[in-house]
Amino acid sequence: MEAITFNLSPTIELTDEQFFQLCQNNQDLRIERTAQGELILMPPTGWESGNRNGRLNQWLFNWTDLDGTGIAFDSSTGYKLPNGANRSPDASWISKERLEALNPDPAKFMPMAPDFAVELRSATDSLRAMQQKMQEYMDCGVRLAWLIDPQNQQVEIYRLGQNVEVLKSPTSLSGEDVLPGFVLDLMGILS
């Protein structure tokens, strides 16, 4: 089952608080909102994607605990991006310095783009839609993002201000200067 997009505009324009409350009232649903106000309902993933996403988050959270320079987040974390969209990457990270400077309300969506974001394509995800989402992250200030695509055995690396780099069947990925020292082993995630 693919994601379902609802265009409520111009009939209904949800405020940020109304969208937040909609998500709170429907916690079993994964809901995102585009910058144009469209609501995207995403179905649960199959067990294989769920396992891959768990491994991805495990690697990121373990590194974050050891590194101590930032905070990692899973796919249940909502971000209010600068363009007005509400997105929930499969995994993300923000530096403690940026978090402390903003001091956001922990009960609300994060009111900024993460420094680092990862999307893991599941069998029902449209590659084109995922690539558009990745570009949206970059346009909103994400410094490094990975689109991991098991179906095509590739990873697209998005860097702020640079062209997308496509790697065919890589065995690992580096966090580069955004997450210095972080290396994601793709065994069990890409293959």
Image: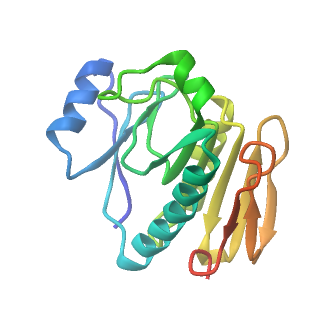
Residue 13 seen in the current view: no
Q: Is residue 89 above or below residue 185?
A: above
> Residue drawn 20% across and 36% down?
24
Query: Which x, y percent locates residue 143?
Result: 72, 37
> Residue drawn 50% across and 64% down?
58
Can you tell which quarter of the image residue 188 is in?
Answer: bottom right
Q: Using the image as rendered, state which of residue 88 and residue 96 is in the foreground.
A: 96
Query: Which x, y percent locates residue 3?
Result: 37, 56
Q: Quadrant of the C terminus?
A: bottom right
Query: Which x, y percent locates residue 2?
Result: 38, 62
Can you tell which quarter of the image residue 183 is in?
Answer: bottom right
> Residue drawn 56% across and 31% down?
113
Residue 119 seen in the current view: yes
How many marks are shown on the rendered structure? 0
Q: Is residue 22 above or below residue 149?
A: above
> Residue drawn 58% across and 50% down?
64
Q: Using the image as rendered, state which of residue 32 and residue 116 is in the foreground.
A: 116
Q: Using the image as rendered, state which of residue 60 and residue 117 is in the foreground.
A: 60
Q: Using the image as rendered, state which of residue 74 and residue 134 is in the foreground.
A: 74
Q: Quadrant of the N terminus?
A: bottom left
Query: Which x, y percent locates residue 103?
Result: 46, 18
